[in-house]
Image: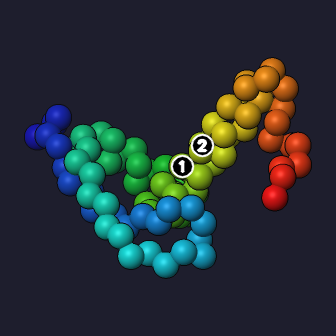
Amino acid sequence: MTGMLSLVSIQIQFYGSCMRKTETLNLRVSAEFKKRLFAEAKKENRSVTNYLEATLATLWKEKSARIAKDVHGRDLSAEPTDG
């Protein structure tokens, strides 16, 4: 049935591939979303979990860089931090 929601069960880790995967995340998504997700992961020769982790890590990194740049109108992400 088109438009029906399907349940995708994946394991996802928070930041980095060194962390042990211990948490389960269940998502309810449309059939179209699931199909696209699996296709995109396959294009990059990744598992769905690895694709989501890599894509979100990249997105979060880019978002943090934009925020750092926007705070004072300059790129703060390249400046050294105290500590």
> Residue 67: image x %, image y %?
68, 31
Instruction: Pinpoint residue 51: horizontal percent, then vertical percent.
Output: 51, 57
Q: Secondary structure at mark 2?
A: helix
Amino acid type for the residue under numbered disc 1? Leu
Say left or right for 57 vs 77.
left
Q: Decide if residue 58 is on the left or right side of residue 22.
A: right
Is 29 or 1 nearer to us in this picture? 29
Tell me the quarter of the picture where residue 68 sits. Answer: top right
The residue at 88%/43% (across/down) is 79
**Quarter of the image where the N terminus is located:** top left
Spatial CA distance of label 2 from label 1 is 5 Å
Disc 2 marks a residue whose amino acid type is Leu
Q: Is residue 81 left or right of residue 1?
A: right
The residue at 77%/29% (across/down) is 69
Identify the disc placed on residue 30. Answer: none
Front residue of 30/65: it is 65
- What label does residue 56 carry, if any? 1
Is 43 or 58 nearer to us in this picture? 58
User: At 31% from the left edge and 67% from the top edge, which residue is drawn?
Assistant: 24
Q: Are marks 2 and 1 in contact (CB under 8 Å)?
A: yes
x, y (%) of residue 2? Answer: 16, 36
Residue visible at 83% across and 50% down?
81
Above or below for 10 versus 59: below
Tell me if residue 36 comes above or below residue 71 in the rendering. below
Q: How dense is the environment of label 1, judged by Cα within 10 Å: few (below 14), some, or many (20 and up)?
A: some
What secondary structure is found at the residue carrying circle 1? helix
Circle 2 is placed at which residue position?
A: 59
Q: Is residue 34 left or right of residue 62?
A: left
Which image quadrant is residue 30 in? top left
| Disc 2: CA contacts within 10 A as few (<14), some (14-19) or many (>=20) | few
